[in-house]
Image (cartoon, coloured by chain):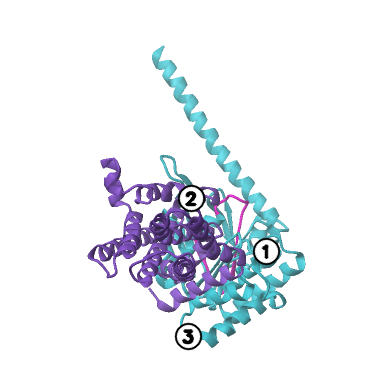
Chain colours: A cyan, B purple
Amino acid sequence: MMNNRSETPPSAAPPAVHAHGLTVRRGTGRTPRTVLDDIAFDVPRGRITGLLGPSGCGKSTLMRAIVGTQAHVTGTLDVLGHPAGHPALRSRIGYVTQAPSVYDDLTVRQNLDYFAAVLDPGRAAADRRREAVTRAITDVDLTARADALAGNLSGGQRSRVSLAVALLGSPELLVLDEPTVGLDPVLRRDLWNLFHDITATRGATLLVSSHVMDEAERCHDLLLMREGRILAQDTPDALRTRTHATTVEEGFLRLVDEANAKANAHADADSDAAASNVTALREQTR
Amino acid sequence: MNAARTTATAARVLRQLRHDPRSIALMLLVPVLMLTLLRYVFDGSPRTFDTIGASLLGIFPLITMFLVTSIATLRERTSGTLERLLAMPLGKGDLIAGYALAFGAVAVVQSLLATGLALWLLGLDVVGSPWLLLLVALLDALLGTALGLFVSAFAASEFQAVQFMPAVIFPQLLLCGLFAARDTMQPVLSGLSDVLPMSYAVDGMTQVLTHTDMTADFVRDTVVVAACALLVLALGAATLRRRTP
């Protein structure tokens, strides 16, 4: 476990997500912003990979690219053996956006009933759907509120409804954008137990983003991001060992400092070069 | 397209509406009240009530469905549910047909109430069959749904969405022949009214008002309205993007 680096995947199976030279530009007009800049990484199958980094570093854009709802994606991005956004992937990926995307004017169960009907349509599948809905509601611990309108629930409860929708249809890959924001510690622990249970017993792959570093310790693998680039891909243990840190947060900060120092060194070298050019120019004109 | 996904979507839209009884009441009762008002405004000239009343039977469903659909699809876009649905195996056609089906059903109820009241209680004098009135009303509702769906793509907020109502509907209302006969307008405007779908909706209603049988003009008018509705629905489908820029 300690030495599981990105170049030696933990299992022989191909990774759930494979990215190479992945670049995303956003915004229209003459100056599109580069949100993801030539990044490469793998998300191993059957494990929980944490996508960590400060807000605005491109986590959500990367997740949208993986589920296929992001435009202007260039480079290689393969998801479960298909290029990202392939129609065959739509029933195999569960996706939870940062803001809960559910209908406020429907009850919890009505929300799930509808999304279940989209995933598994037809009258013949009605029994299967009912089971899936009940299981998803139980998974996120909302059985007592199943007949409440989603709009009347608390923020944390609404985001759990959104998570329950993603759990329908037992997806092979779950992409969860900050699923634990605004939850109390007990619920957060319960959800992480659920995530581990989903990978262990249902064999699913989880990609979970967070900007809270203490959640990193609960992941099998980590992708650390900063300003549109992957800073490191490692297990929590290996990251701590490599950076001689006691927590992942400390390790992350050391990597950021290193990256900054390197960037400054480059900038200094550039300005040195510019300065010597100017001197050369002066000498020529003299 | 998948029939089960379409009907599931229509059922979901109606279920959302059921949690909002006030909206249902407004959609069903406002046309009835307006027609009643109109009847007594033209108390002294029943002929005027006949022409304007018949035209309004076609215009009400168009306006109501335009407003309801543009707000409903705007909400779908801003709440993130549209992104979620399009990341799922739902066809754009399923979503749009689902909306059209659900609001079409509401439009049938609305038109039944308004037509029934106008014909049997307010004494609206129609020569043709009331079923043809209902048919035109339903096509108008479909056109309203289509236009609402389409403009919601250009609205960033509910504020903007409701402002599209006067921008898209009022010019058609002024040019449709309700206020002045279309061929007496300034030639440019008369030509413009020939390409606006609401003109055909109102013409169709007038045909039913004055002829016992289905005339060739009536068939042409209904075909134009239906074709416009389908065209705009297709344009609306094109505005639903799976990928956010």
Residue highlighted by disc 3: A123
Vertical relation: A204 (above or below) B22 = below
The circle on residue A180 is 1
Question: What chain does badge 2 belong to?
Answer: B
x, y percentage for residue A147?
67, 76
User: Same subunit under labels 3 and 2?
Assistant: no
- Could you say which quadrant of the image residue B129 lies in? bottom left
Q: Nearer the viewer, residue A93 or B53?
A: B53
- Could you say which quadrant of the image residue A32 lies in? top left
Question: What chain does badge 1 belong to?
Answer: A
Q: Which residues are magenta?
A: A41-58
Question: What is the distance, in whole Å, between disc 3 and disc 1 at their CAs?
Answer: 35 Å
Residue highlighted by disc 2: B155
Q: Nearer the viewer, residue B184 or B90?
A: B184
Q: Secondary structure at mark 2?
A: loop
> For residue A151: magenta?
no
Side of B215 where A127 appears, left or right: right
- Number of residues whose C-alpha sits closer than 10 Å to that of mark 1, classed few (under 14), some (14–19) or many (20 or more): many
x, y percentage for residue B22?
61, 64
Question: What chain does badge 3 belong to?
Answer: A
> For residue A49: magenta?
yes
The residue sitting at the left extreme is B216
Residue type, numbered disc 2: Ala
